[in-house]
Image (cartoon, coloured by chain):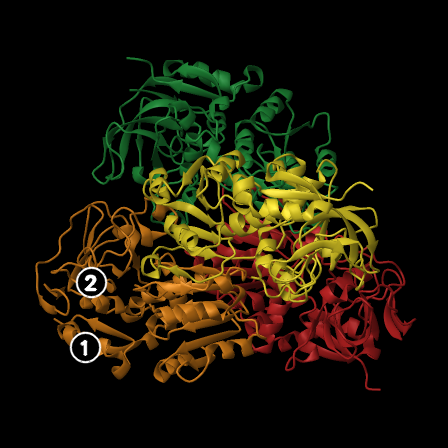
Chain colours: A orange, B yellow, C red, D green
Amino acid sequence: MRALVYHGPGQKSWEEVADPEILDDGDVIVRVDATTICGTDLHILKGDVPAVHKGRILGHEAVGTIWEVGDGVRRFCPGDRVLVSCISACGSCQFCREGRYGQCLEGGGWVLGHKVDGTQAEFVRVLYADKSMFHIPDGVSDEEALMLADILPTGYEVGVLAGGVRPGDVVAIIGAGPIGLSAITGARLYSPSHIVAIDLSDARLEAAKQFGADVTVNNTREDPLAVIKDLTGRMGADVSIEAVGVPASFELAVKLARPGGRIANIGVHGEPVALHLEEQWIRDITITTGLVDTSSTPTLMRLMTTGQIDAKPFITHHFDMDDFEEAYDVFARAADTGALKVVLTRGSE
Amino acid sequence: MRALVYHGPGQKSWEEVADPEILDDGDVIVRVDATTICGTDLHILKGDVPAVHKGRILGHEAVGTIWEVGDGVRRFCPGDRVLVSCISACGSCQFCREGRYGQCLEGGGWVLGHKVDGTQAEFVRVLYADKSMFHIPDGVSDEEALMLADILPTGYEVGVLAGGVRPGDVVAIIGAGPIGLSAITGARLYSPSHIVAIDLSDARLEAAKQFGADVTVNNTREDPLAVIKDLTGRMGADVSIEAVGVPASFELAVKLARPGGRIANIGVHGEPVALHLEEQWIRDITITTGLVDTSSTPTLMRLMTTGQIDAKPFITHHFDMDDFEEAYDVFARAADTGALKVVLTRGSE
Amino acid sequence: MRALVYHGPGQKSWEEVADPEILDDGDVIVRVDATTICGTDLHILKGDVPAVHKGRILGHEAVGTIWEVGDGVRRFCPGDRVLVSCISACGSCQFCREGRYGQCLEGGGWVLGHKVDGTQAEFVRVLYADKSMFHIPDGVSDEEALMLADILPTGYEVGVLAGGVRPGDVVAIIGAGPIGLSAITGARLYSPSHIVAIDLSDARLEAAKQFGADVTVNNTREDPLAVIKDLTGRMGADVSIEAVGVPASFELAVKLARPGGRIANIGVHGEPVALHLEEQWIRDITITTGLVDTSSTPTLMRLMTTGQIDAKPFITHHFDMDDFEEAYDVFARAADTGALKVVLTRGSE
Amino acid sequence: MRALVYHGPGQKSWEEVADPEILDDGDVIVRVDATTICGTDLHILKGDVPAVHKGRILGHEAVGTIWEVGDGVRRFCPGDRVLVSCISACGSCQFCREGRYGQCLEGGGWVLGHKVDGTQAEFVRVLYADKSMFHIPDGVSDEEALMLADILPTGYEVGVLAGGVRPGDVVAIIGAGPIGLSAITGARLYSPSHIVAIDLSDARLEAAKQFGADVTVNNTREDPLAVIKDLTGRMGADVSIEAVGVPASFELAVKLARPGGRIANIGVHGEPVALHLEEQWIRDITITTGLVDTSSTPTLMRLMTTGQIDAKPFITHHFDMDDFEEAYDVFARAADTGALKVVLTRGSE
C-alpha cells in the first residue's frame, strides 16, 4: 500500500510500504477512506517529537471501513464504517477505568502516528479496537465524522468540560485555529451568554464569528482585558480557554479570568510559563491541563446526527491521497491558504 | 480599651485606644476573650501589605462575648459566646450567594485587622455579624474554637476541599507550619491511604506526625519525588498541597502530582512561579488557588464537638493580653521557640 | 390601596385594604407594576393550602418600582425597577448559606401570598429585600422579567439542574403547562439531542413544540415508553422531568428513565405515589424533589438580556389589575382559553 | 471437580461436575481458594430469581489462584493470587465506559452464579478477566480480600458514595446485616459526626457498634425519628441508607432525611413502596438506587493494605468446602447462629 512516511526532520514522502497486519487479538485493519493532517504532524516534521522515529507512518485521524478483525474483537465486523479515534484505550488499566483514556498505561493513549504506524495511509492497524473506534451512523458523512477523531473532542473535553462552562457564562477563547474553533463549537452547547474569541488574525476571527463567537478581539489592535472587563462589569471571564500553546497566550488566559474563574489549557506548550501567584493566590482560580480522552465522542456524534454540531465549516480543502504532499503544503501555509482542516480521500479504483 | 496598634513597618504597640462603636445596623461589639497571631500579621509588620495603614488595630481571629448588637442583628444577643471568623460576608453579593465569602464584593472578605480594626484588642466591632460569626457549643473551649477562626477552615477549604482529597488517596503536603498541619488535620477526615508531610525542619515534621502524617520527608536530606514515586508505583501523588508560599515549594507540588492529579495552593506568594507547561500540558492536572471562605466552619465546629478534630496540639504558648508584645516575639521566632499558635487571653479583672 | 384578598375556599375579591408598611430594617415597599397568577393560587382558592388564612393578599410574583426602603437595605433605592422573587431568603441560616433559599429557616422561603401578604396588590412589602429581589436590566421588559419570579427558575433549578441535563441527552418532560414549558426552555440551554414533551392536550403539545420540544407525545393516543425506547435504542431517557403533580405522571417519569437515569420531580403532589423498587432497586436511578431557590435568577436574567431566553411566548393574556377577577377566571379555565400566563398591570393614573 | 449446584427451589447439592473451560479469549480459569455465601444465594434458593436455571453452580464471590488464561488476557498469569469480583465488565459498552460496570450491556454485570456458573466450586471460569478481577497485595489475607468481592464495595458505592456522605454529616443506616455493616465501614471513611445504626436485633446493633456506629436504635423499642431529631436539632439526617429491602425500611429512610438530604437504597426489594410525595415534593430530597459496579475495589483494597479497613470482623464462621451444605444452614439461620459472613476454603490435598 501507499503511506505518508516520516524520514526525519523536514523529510516525508508518500510511498509504497508493506501492508499492516493483525498483531494482537484485539486489533483490526481499517481501509482508510478519509484522513486529515493535524498541527501535531507539523511539529513532528520539525523534529519536535523525539518519540517519532524515522520510518513511522504519520497521522492519528481517520474514517474508514473495517477490512479484517482480530479474534478478540467483538464490536466490529468487516465492512463496518468506522471512526478511528486519535486515542487508543486498553480499557482495563487504572486510567482507562476512570475514563482517562489519554493516559492509558498499557500501550494506549496517543499512539497512532506516534509510537505505532498511523492513519495517513491506505490501511491502518488499530489496536484495542473495541475501545478505540466508533460506528458512524447514517446521515453523518465521512468527512464530518473525521472531525470527531481529534479536534472536536479535544476542544470539548480539554477546553469546555475541564473549564466547566455553564449557561450564562462569559467564555474567552484565545486562539481561533481548528482547536479554538472546536472549543467555540463545544462551548455553545452550554449556552454561555458571550463567547469572546481572541486572535491575531482577522481571517481567523471571521471564522470564529461563523462558528459562534459573538465578540471578537484582534489583540494586535485591541486590549482583550478591557473588552472582557467591559462585558462583565469589571469582573473578568467565568472561563478562559487557551488554544495556542505559547506563554503569552496562557498568561493572558489567566489574566482574563474572574475571581473564582477557571482557566483551561488546551495548547501544546514547548516552554515554561510564568504563573503570577503573587496576584492569583487569593483569587480562587482553577487551572486545568489535559490530553483528550475521546470519552465524549459518542455524545458529539449524536449531536452531529441531530444537526446540533455542524462540522462542515472546518473543512476548507479536499485532496486525493496521492496529493498528500501538496495537502501538507497547503495546511502548513494556513495563514496564506486559509486552511482549517484538509481532507484526504482515497482515489476511486 | 487597650489594643495592639500598627504604627508602620516594624512598629507596633499595645496601647490605650478609643472603644469601638456600632456603625451599622448589622454590627456587633464583641468583648475579646481569646485571640491569636497569624503569619499574615508578621507580613503586615514587615510592611508587605500596603492596604494596612498606620493606626490600624491588627488581628482577624477571636473568641469572645457579645457586648452590644446593632438593630438589624438577628442571630446574636449580648452575652452569647461566639467565634469571630477571619472572613466577613455581606450575604447578598454575587460571590456571597455562591458561598465564596472570601471574595465578598460589598466590603466583606478579609477586612478585620486589614481594612478595619481587628481582634487584637479588648473589644472589636464585627460587621455583617449574622453572616460572619458562629455560636460556640458547650464542650468546645475558647482556645480550641479560636483555631476555627482561620487556620482550620483555611487548610480544609483551600487545601483539602479544593484539592478534592478522597479515600485511599496519597496526599503530599508541603510545609508543616500551622497551615500545613491544618491541611493534615482536614485531609484525615477523608481517609487518604498516606499523608506525606514535607518540610525543612525535623521539629515541624515531628509535629506533622502527631497531627496524622504517616510519612515525613525532610527535603534538606531526602528527595520527596523519590519517596512519592516509591509509595505510588511510580505514579505520583493524587493530591499535593502547597502550604509555604515560595516558588520552590509550588514547583515541587506540581512535580509531585500524578497525571490526573490536583495541586492545591494555600501559600501566600510574593512573586511569580514557573509553571512547566511543556511537561504538564498533557498530564491532566488541576491547579487551584484560593482565600478561605469559612463556609466549612459549622462542619468543623461539629467535628470538634464530637472529638473528631482535636485543636489543642496547635496551641503551644499562652499569654495574657498585656504581654502582647512578648507573644509576637515568641511567635516570630517560631524556629527557636517551637511556636505553632500562641493564645492571648484577657486578664482577670 | 387595592388588593386581591382571599376570604376562604372559593372566595376572593379585589378590594380596598390598608397600605403595607415597613416592619423590619431589611424590608422594602414595592409599587407593583405587573403581577401574575400561579397554579398554586388556584390550589389556595380550593382550600388546599391550610397555612393561608382568610384575609391574606395572594400572589408571589411581581415586577415593580421601589417605593420605600428600610434602614438596613443596601442594594435598592426608591425608584429602582425590580423583580420580586417568589422566594425570600434571610441569607444567614444553614440552608441560605448553602444557596437552598427555598428552605430558609428564618421566616423566608415561599412566604409571599402564603404566610405574609403577597404581590396581587398595588403595593407589597418584601422582606429580606437585599437577598430576595433583583434589578432588571434595560432591554428586558416588565412582563418578560415577571416570568423570572417563579416559573423559569422553577423549571430550570428543580427540573433541569436537579435532573442533571447534559449535552446530547434525551430528555422526557411530562406536562406541558407553564412549568413544563419552563423546563423545556431551561433544558435547551444544555443542548440535549431530543426533548420529548408528553401531555394529554394537543394544544399544549403545540406550545411545547414552539418552546423547543422536537418530539411530542399525546398519551391519550400514543405510548410514551414506546416512543422513548425507539429514540434511545431501547435504553430509556437520560433524564425525565415530572411537571404535573399526580401519581400517574410520576410513575411514568420513573418508567421512562434509562438505567443510570435521573428523574426530577417538579410537580406539587397531594398524595403518595407507588415507587416500584422491585424493578428499580438495581437500575442506578436518581430521583430528586425540590422547591425552587431562585439561585439561578441572575443567570437566567442574563440570558434573557442576550435574547437566549425568550419569555414572551408564555404570556397569552393581559389585564388591568382592576380586572383581576376576570383574569383569575381566564387562567382557571386554561383548557378552554389557552391561557399560559396572564399578566396584570396597574392602570394608568 | 465439585461444586454447589442449584436444582430448583429449595434444592442444592455439593456434587461432582465437569471442570470449567476457557470459552473466550478473555476468559481465565481460577482455582477457588476461598468463597462465601451471600443473602442473594438464599433468595435464589427460594426460587425468587427466575433467571437462575436448574443445574447452575451458585456463588459470585471468590479469592483464588489463576489456573489457565485465554489468549487475550493481558493482566493475569497462571499462579497469580486474585480477587474474583461479583461484577464482570466488558469494558467497551456505553455503561462500562462510564464506569457503570454493574449495568454492562455485553454479557457482563452480575452474571456469576446467576447467568453463568459461579464461584461455589473448586474452579470457576471468569469472563472478561482483565476487567473483572484484581491482584491481591501481600499483607491482605484471602479471607479479608474475599469481603471485597461484593459486600464492601456494595455498601461503599451504593450506600456511601451514592448517598454523598461528607465530613460532619449525621448518617442513619437502617439494617445492620453484612451490607449495613459494610455501609458503616464505608461511611467512616468520610468522618461523619454520627453514624446511627437502626435494626430490630440487639445482637446486630452490638455488631454495628463494633464496626463504628456511635448511636444504635432498636426500633422494636425506640423511635428512630425521635433519636435523629434529637441529634440534629429537629432537622433530620443528612444521609439515610436503606440496607434491608422491605417497604417499611425504605419509608423510614425517607422519613429520617432532612430537607436537602439524600436517601441511598441498597436493599433488594420484592415489592413497590409508597413514596410520600405529598410531603416530600417540597423537601429537596434525592433518592438513589443501584447495583454495585466494583469500581471502588482498588481504593478499598488499598485501604485494607494500610489497615484503615478491617474486614476480619465480618467473618464469623469457617468451613471446608466439603461442608458447604452445613455452611448454608448456618448462614441461613443467622439470627440464631450470629453468622455475618461464612468463609469456605478448599481442603488441603
The chain ID associated with circle 2 is A
**Residue assigned mark 2:** A119
Asked whether B115 or C297 is in front, the reply is B115
Q: Is residue B213 left or right of residue B234?
A: right
Q: Quadrant of residue A116?
A: bottom left
The kind of secondary structure element at disc 2 is: loop
Q: Earlier in the sequence, mark 2 or mark 1?
A: 2
**Which image quadrant: the N terminus of chain D?**
top left
- Residue D333 placement (x, y as % from top left): 54, 18
Name the residue type under label 2: Thr
Q: Position of residue D339 (x, y in %)?
A: 52, 19
Q: Which residue is mark 1?
A: A329
A114, B289: nearer the viewer: B289
Residue A206 in sight here = yes
Q: Residues within 10 Å of mark 1 (few under 14, many from 20)?
A: few
| Local SS, label 1 | helix
Horizontal side, residue A5 vs residue B163: left or right: left
